[in-house]
Image (cartoon, rainbow, N blue to C red):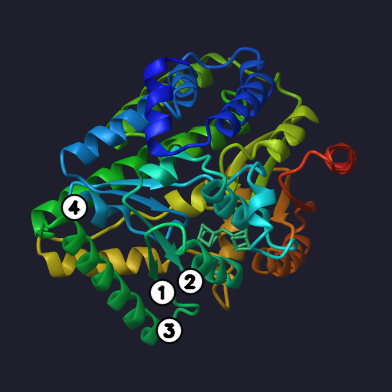
Amino acid sequence: MSKEHVDMWKELGLDLEAHDGLLGILGQAYGDIFLSQKNRPEGMKYFDFVVSEVHGLRIKELIEEKKKGNLVVGTFCVYVPEELVLAVDGVQIGLCAGAEVGFEKAEEHLPRNTCALIKAFVGFRLADLCPYTEVADFVVGETTCDGKKKAYELFSGFKDLYVMEIPQMKRESDRQLWKTEILRFRDELEKRSGKKITAEGLKKGIEIVNEKRKALQRLAKIRYKHPSVISGRDALLINQISFYDNPARFIGSVNTLCDELEERGKSGVSINGNSFKKIVMSGCPMAVPNWKTPFLVESAGAAIVAEESCVGERNTRDMIAGYGDSLETMLESLVDRYMKIDCACFTPNEERLENIIKMVRDSKADGVIHYSLQFCTPYLIESKKVQERCRKEGIPYLTLETDYSSGDMEQLKTRIEAFIEKL
Ligand code: BJ8
């Protein structure tokens, strides 16, 4: 690792020894899960490079942005509108929370039976492990599940935190509440950046994020049509990287990859032969480096053809449409777009069931694997509804409940293999 990076981490206050350990685990897992794949598309080289520099060059770029006077905003949820951050020339970074490295510290403050994602974001901060959390000017929390809501009260003791209130239902009064929250967030960004959000600035933000979603939608559609041109774990990785890479560079790289994948599709190039079963993964978001379950599913001879999660199509399916030219119409379109997100924290949440079935039909998948983190009440309870709906539609279904440890790998492997064999 270059001395320049080490100096930068020191300045950010990282625990260098623990951080070295984290990078070691990350590098090993990346080699085993991603680089060992045969016949990967050439276009994945860009994303390999991004991962190899995830705590290096990208952090350096963020520090440069700060020197220019631009805000760096950390987030944990797809409800936080990146368009508004871009409208003040800021950078929005989705913070990962996909490893159990800081759990010991987190459990000094949180009950052990807290979901792994929450323990990870608290642990990363307390163990001084995440350069993104450290470099962010502030972090935006949100009132989604109860665990996150209460953990943010604790987190605010260790990091500058702003919380958005997310409604839990989708009635007109809830939309009003959400609009108020969007306007409050706009005011906060203006205050912190010293810049006014103009129609021109917001339009630029909307166009960039729409382009990002369009590129990821293109990738999703190619996988529906040609399920064997790219692995599901590579597609997941690209979705994960979408949360922290430079947007313009990311969009260009996804589109270049998609050109290659379309060519592969036409010439019948395959990464896994043609005798595989197609799976839609559905449920909790998988943050970097939480690659355990996709790896097990694909190692069992199946191809993941779509992700029904926030690191997947829940985040990319809806564009901001009909936004017009005035600030007012743009803000209204923004409010509408984010109200469509079908997170299990909402009640009722029937549209999620419709979306899952549509994804299965569109991708011609053979089955659904539902993935919940342990102690995640919203997704665990909703998994019963997903199961029931799949049963009615005649779609084979498997539900998994796990965490970030490797202790249950064998048990998961057995269940996944048995499910795929039956398809
Ligand atoms: S919009 S899914 S990113 S809240 S896994 S912390 S729900 S107990 S992450 Fe999420 Fe926003 Fe919803 Fe998406 Fe709680 Fe469950 Fe843990 Fe979770």
The quarter of the picture showing ligand 1: bottom right
Q: Is residue 199 left or right of residue 393?
A: left
Q: Is residue 387 visible?
A: yes
Callout 4: few (<14), some (14-19), or many (20+) C-alpha neighbours within 10 Å? many
The kind of secondary structure element at disc 2 is: loop
Q: Earlier in the sequence, mark 3 or mark 2?
A: 2
Callouts 4 and 1 close, C-beta under 8 Å: no
Q: Earlier in the sequence, mark 1 or mark 3?
A: 1
Q: Name the residue at 65% across, 28% down.
A: 25
Callout 3: few (<14), some (14-19), or many (20+) C-alpha neighbours within 10 Å? few
The residues bearing labels 3 and 2 have C-alpha atoms spaced at a distance of: 17 Å
The residues bearing labels 4 and 3 have C-alpha atoms spaced at a distance of: 28 Å
Q: Earlier in the sequence, mark 4 or mark 1?
A: 4
Amino acid carrying mark 1 in the image:
Glu
Amino acid carrying mark 3 in the image:
Arg
In this figure, which residue is indicated by the disc labeled 4? 87
Q: Which mark is residue 165?
A: 1
In this figure, which residue is indicated by the disc labeled 2? 143
The residues bearing labels 4 and 1 have C-alpha atoms spaced at a distance of: 21 Å
Expressed as whole percent of the image width and height from the top left, the position of residue 345 reads 56, 70
Amino acid carrying mark 2 in the image:
Thr
In this figure, which residue is indicated by the disc labeled 3? 171
Callouts 2 and 1 close, C-beta under 8 Å: yes
Q: Earlier in the sequence, mark 2 or mark 4?
A: 4
- Above or below 150: residue 57: above
Expressed as whole percent of the image width and height from the top left, the position of residue 42 reads 48, 13
Q: Residue furthest bottom?
A: 173
Q: Earlier in the sequence, mark 4 or mark 3?
A: 4
Q: Name the residue at 69% across, 50% down.
A: 104
The residues bearing labels 1 and 3 have C-alpha atoms spaced at a distance of: 15 Å
Decide which of 4, 79 is in the foreground and name it.
4
Q: Name the residue at 55% across, 50% down.
A: 126
